[in-house]
Image (cartoon, rainbow, N blue to C red):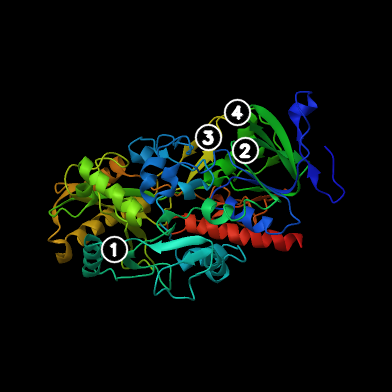
């Protein structure tokens, strides 16, 4: 490997060293692994400095699939393994021994290209707790400027102290609808305050979701951050590239070994490697590189580069369970798409003004509520959707119906991500341990009861004919818990597997540097000390904004 005069390092193909190809004379200051919600932000902000050569690696393809950009397209992309890792968890003991689908974005934009578009930051108390754990610089006051920097909100009436108007990420309000209005009113009647901005001064309440769209189209990290930066001569974007391992010399990470089109290359970074592959793939790559629990790695025949047992531990996710209702009026999406004429009309409406069912996010109304009077902040979140199906992602029900899901916002159960093989092509073992904590079980039962309480209010009396799921005969706590165990699922918010902290159970420090190594940072949902009380995309983009600032400060 050769060094340039200014300290940057050339990439040299292993195939070339074996006489199988030409030497690649590219040079990079930073190599970013993963073009997801955080990686795209890093690529934009770092490459804004023209003296820095930045390489962004993505295992998946470019974001050319048209369903990525149409909001309702998440209904298709969640199951499309051409742009989705399509992970499966191990069997979960407390959830009936079931395994769960865990879609993760494998495309430019990562999960921001396939998710349900809900933009929710979490509670101020989430970030203040991170600071209390010793993570200096991560309180809510510290991170709020980065949320605001990202936002290009077009919603009227927002508190300007809490929101940004000029950022790259499009933020709109979910489209209003009489059934949605009635649901918000019913929540008020059930004692949950109306709240038109859960990303403002307080989270508690019911209101329309804020969603990542601009002019009717999905605003992903790729469209918001990569698209305006992609012509910069110092930003290099490489798709279809699988990372095999990190290259480590002593205690310094100096590069990345990758596989692309059957060819193995070793790419060298003059300054740092930035791991932004997400809560599953970031710990996987660390473990494949010999960074993790030494005993586990040796069992797989992997040479130990750095014994760091916390890698892959502390996995957290939001477990969710749905209730569905038969609607007594033809006001749901089920009614609009029941036959080919309706589907044609929906398509024409989208083409005309980017409205109608094709503009829907995974939830139109959000509710953040307390299940008990002794909790200080909301502990459950509802997603209200004006459609219903027998199973998520399947054909809509043949009758008018709507769905309400509830998830516990601060799960106490902890799982892990551990590689099961030294082969980088194989998926890791994922054990979320849903409902392992009695608090989690009790909160989910209370959450389903609260969904029922809202559904029983006068505001919805003219809309609901009967409860389909869990069903009127499911009434006791034991019956509700059995329903939650048998029918709950992931809401796809894995986090915390490379936890930030200053204690021995942490993987990265508050500046996101991996403990015990140089030249390597992790920046994505995996660094969250605890899972935010909301959907995770907004926080991941904030992490990217803050990480970029810290990196530029550290190299200045």
Contact, CB < 8 Å: mark 4 with mark 3? no
Q: Position of residue 198 (x, y in %)?
A: 39, 67
Q: Mark 1 highlights which residue?
A: 176
Label 4 crowd bin: few (<14), some (14–19), many (20+), radius 10 Å: few
Contact, CB < 8 Å: mark 1 with mark 4? no
* Element carrying mark 3: loop
Contact, CB < 8 Å: mark 3 with mark 2? yes
Q: How much space separates mark 1 and mark 4, taking CA atoms?
A: 49 Å
Side (left or right) of 17 relative to 212? right
* Element carrying mark 2: helix
Q: Mark 4 highlights which residue?
A: 423
Q: How much space separates mark 3 and mark 1, taking CA atoms?
A: 42 Å
Observer able to see residue 121: no
- Compare marks 4 and 3 and give the one earlier in the sequence: 4
**Image height of 168 relative to 265, above or below:** below
Q: How much space separates mark 2 and mark 4, taking CA atoms?
A: 11 Å
* Element carrying mark 1: loop
Q: Position of residue 51 (x, y in %)?
A: 76, 56
Q: Mark 2 highlights which residue?
A: 287
| Total marks in image | 4
Q: Mark 3 highlights which residue?
A: 428
Tell me the mark number nearer the camera, choosing from 1 and 2: 1
- Compare marks 1 and 2 and give the one earlier in the sequence: 1
- Compare marks 2 and 4 and give the one earlier in the sequence: 2
**Image height of 329 relative to 143, above or below:** above
x 49%, y 53%: residue: 220
* Element carrying mark 4: loop
Tell me the mark number nearer the camera, choosing from 3 and 1: 1
Which is nearer the eye, 225 or 458?
225
Q: Position of residue 92 (x, y in %)?
A: 39, 38
């Amino acid at each position: 490997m050769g060094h340039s005069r200014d300290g940057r390092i050339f990439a040299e193909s292993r195939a070339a060293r074996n006489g199988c190809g030409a030497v690649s004379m590219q040079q990079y200051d930073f190599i970013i692994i993963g073009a997801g919600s955080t990686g795209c932000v890093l690529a934009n902000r770092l490459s804004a400095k023209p003296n820095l050569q930045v390489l962004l690696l993505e295992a998946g393809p470019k974001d050319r699939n048209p369903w990525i950009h149409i909001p309702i397209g998440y209904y298709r992309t969640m199951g499309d393994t051409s742009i989705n890792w399509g992970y499966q968890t191990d069997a979960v003991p407390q959830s009936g021994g079931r395994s769960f689908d865990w879609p993760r974005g494998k495309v430019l934009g990562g999960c921001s290209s396939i998710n349900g578009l809900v933009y929710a930051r979490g509670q101020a108390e989430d970030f203040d707790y991170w600071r209390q754990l010793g993570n200096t610089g991560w309180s809510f006051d510290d991170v709020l400027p980065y949320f605001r920097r990202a936002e290009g909100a077009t919603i009227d009436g927002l508190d300007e102290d809490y929101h940004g108007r000029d950022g790259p990420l499009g933020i709109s309000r979910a489209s209003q609808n009489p059934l949605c209005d009635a649901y918000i009113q019913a929540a008020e009647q059930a004692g949950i305050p109306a709240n038109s901005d859960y990303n403002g001064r307080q989270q508690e309440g019911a209101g329309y979701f804020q969603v990542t769209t601009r002019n009717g189209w999905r605003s992903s990290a790729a469209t918001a951050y990569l698209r305006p930066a992609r012509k910069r001569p110092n930003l290099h974007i490489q798709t279809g590239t699988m990372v095999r391992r990190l290259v480590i010399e002593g205690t310094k990470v100096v590069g990345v070994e990758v596989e692309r089109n059957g060819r193995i290359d070793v790419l060298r970074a003059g300054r740092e490697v930035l791991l932004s592959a997400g809560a599953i793939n970031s710990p996987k790559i660390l473990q494949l590189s010999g960074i993790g629990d030494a005993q586990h790695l040796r069992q797989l025949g992997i040479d130990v580069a750095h014994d760091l047992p916390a890698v892959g531990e502390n996995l957290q996710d939001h477990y969710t369970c749905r209730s569905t209702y038969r609607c007594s009026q033809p006001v749901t999406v089920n009614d609009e798409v029941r036959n080919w004429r309706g589907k044609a009309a929906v398509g024409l409406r989208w083409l005309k003004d980017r409205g109608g069912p094709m503009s829907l996010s995974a939830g139109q109304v959000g509710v953040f509520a307390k299940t008990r009077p002794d909790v200080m902040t909301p502990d459950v979140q509802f997603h209200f959707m004006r459609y219903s199906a027998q199973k998520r992602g399947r054909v809509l029900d043949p009758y008018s119906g709507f769905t309400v899901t509830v998830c516990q916002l601060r799960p106490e159960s902890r799982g892990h991500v551990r590689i099961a093989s030294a082969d980088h092509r194989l998926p890791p073992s994922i054990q979320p341990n849903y409902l392992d904590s009695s608090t989690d079980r009790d909160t989910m039962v209370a959450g389903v009861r609260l969904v029922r309480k809202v559904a029983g209010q006068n505001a919805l009396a003219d809309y609901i004919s009967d409860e389909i799921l869990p069903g009127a005969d499911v009434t006791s706590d034991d019956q509700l818990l059995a329903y939650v165990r048998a029918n709950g699922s992931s809401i796809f918010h894995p986090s915390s597997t490379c936890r930030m902290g200053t204690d021995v159970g942490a993987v990265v420090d508050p500046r996101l540097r991996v403990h015990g190594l140089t030249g390597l940072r992790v920046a994505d949902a995996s660094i969250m000390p605890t899972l935010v009380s909301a959907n995770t995309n907004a926080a991941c983009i904030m992490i990217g904004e803050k990480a970029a600032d810290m990196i530029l400060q550290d190299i200045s």
